[in-house]
Amino acid sequence: MHEVFREFALLLLICTAAGALATLLRQPMLIAYIAVGIIAGPAVLGLVKAHDQIDLLAQVGVAVLLFVVGLKLDLRHVRHIGPVALGTGLGQLAFTIAFGFALIMLMGKPVMESLYVAVALTFSSTIIIVKLLSDKNEIDSLHGRIAVGFLIVQDLAVVLAMMAMSAIGRGGEGGLAGVALSLVWRVMAAAMLLYVLMRYVLPKLADIVARSQELLLIFAVAWGTSLAALGEWAGFSKEAGAFLAGFSLASTAYRDAINARLTGIRDFLLLFFFIDLGAKLDFSTLGGELWPAAVLSLFVLIGNPLIVMSIMGYMGYRKRTNFLAGLTVAQISEFSIIFVAMGISLGHVGASALGLTTLVGLLTITLSTYLIFYSHSLYERLAPWLGIFERARPYRELTVEAQSLTTGQPDVIVFGMGRYGGRLALGLREAGIQVLGVDFDPEVVRELHGKGLVVRYGDGTDTDFLDGLPLSATGWLVSTFPDLTANLGLLSALQKRRCSADVAIVARDENDGLALKQAGAPVVLYPIRNAVDHTVGILADIIRPQSR
């Protein structure tokens, strides 16, 4: 036990150093943690001995992560996102398997190995993608919600694929028919159970436990891990169970409080998931698979996003949404490796298939992390060539734009109608100022329309869209975009148009503020600093009379 404790302490120190280095070099923290797992694992230094303990913490971290994702999934979003998530998820699975199988067969691989690896190429890592989107505050964006939707479809497909391959291993068509029948009744039973819990049990239970903040936190973790365990027992997966646990509480009044208290726990436990992932990568099976792995990695990094972008473009989404969502499938999952390992245990494939899948996983996870990390910058560079993935009339997003209210010339245009921007716009309107909002998320636009706010649907960094705004007749422009690249792009576009309006841009921190000022931003707003200053003033007025 003392050795395990010392090992954990050493791993945390190494992760701290690696994370600090990644921060200084402006690299994704996720890559640093996976690198720690590889270096500390059996492939290099062999420091990791407590595999069972690390694996347990990793599994709890995954359950908490998916639980938090489920918490943020509103029922209204399910109705709008469900069709595109299902269509994109199933379409990507079908096209990737078909093209991947043909590509692997051309490499001279056996039929069964080609089938296994092709199926493995379709699964993207829900845990990694959700973590990256959460870090970028994009999990609630339109492309973030769509990505989470088709990643959940993939997770269910993983379970189905494993069950189907096991049935093939047992032989007979009756095995496959039994798998289908078993899956149908289990899905129906899970849906009925979830309905009863959400309708009659959880609201009352949440009211009771919410009387104590500590008990609310314990209840959230207990509920998430319990349904994760139940999901695995029922033949689905821990991830699906944890996701449904969070979703079952998403309609309660306590979801924001639960989410806030779970964020730190989630990040700490996921550290062990990435260490475990790096430590378990088996480099002994790689052999001569470098060239096939390079080809398949390019197929995953380029082909999978193109497939998703094509499907979403056909379904009526704009090229920006298509591109940002498509990047989330530019890697394979840890479940891909598990799936191929199961094929070895069933005698369907040899160790070379596992080596090939492992190497593709390592390459695509690393490279796709950078693609997602710099997704907005990439979009700005590639936007002129992405028009082929957008319909002449992207009707799903234009539906919201067509519903925009029309009024006189606004006094101020607010770009970005998220939590801060939406509240800012509503406050300005209450102060008697004519406000026009701009956002490219149709769900946000629809919600603010319901509150009587005038919002134009569109991308504030799109030069063509900016030309259609009343910039010359507006006195002030305010940008609340959370991304520095988007703000700099908007500022540059306004300068090129010689816009005479005063411009105010929100900065997350001093570094972003300095970059905006150097780019010519006349006014930079610091919401966090201003909120603290305001709070200090209020408290000072309250405390001074009491101290006299």
Image (spheres, rainbow, N blue to C red):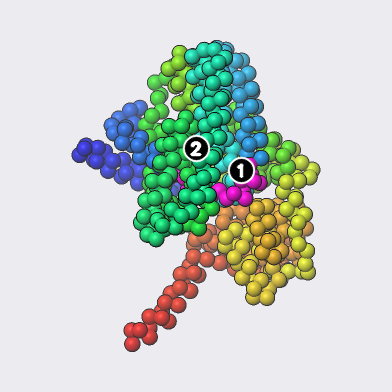
User: Few, some or many C-alpha atoms within 10 Å of disc 1 (few <14, some 14-19, many ≥20)?
Assistant: many
Residue, disc 1: 146
- The residue closer to the viewer here, 431 or 532, is 431
Q: Is residue 467 shown to the viewer in this render?
A: no
Identify the image quadrant of residue 277.
top left
Cα separation between marks 1 and 2: 17 Å
> Circle 1 sits in a helix, a strand or a loop, which is it?
helix
In the displayed structure, 63 sits above or below 263; it is above
User: Few, some or many C-alpha atoms within 10 Å of disc 2 (few <14, some 14-19, many ≥20)?
Assistant: many
Q: Is residue 5 shown to the viewer in this render?
A: yes
Residue at 59 percent across and 65 percent down: it is 423
Residue 240: image tag: 2
- Give x and y (percent) for residue 530: 50, 70
- The residue closer to the viewer here, 407 or 20, is 407
Q: What is the span of residues highlighted in magenta in the rendered image? A: 63-82
- Give x and y (percent) for residue 64: 43, 44
- Give x and y (percent) for residue 86: 63, 36
- The residue closer to the viewer here, 394 or 503, is 394
Is 58 situated left or right of 187 in this image?
left
Tell me, yes or no, whether the highlighted magenta stretch contains residue 73: yes
Q: Are marks 1 and 2 in contact (CB under 8 Å)?
A: no
| Mark closer to the observer (1, 2) | 2
Residue at 49 percent across and 32 percent down: it is 236
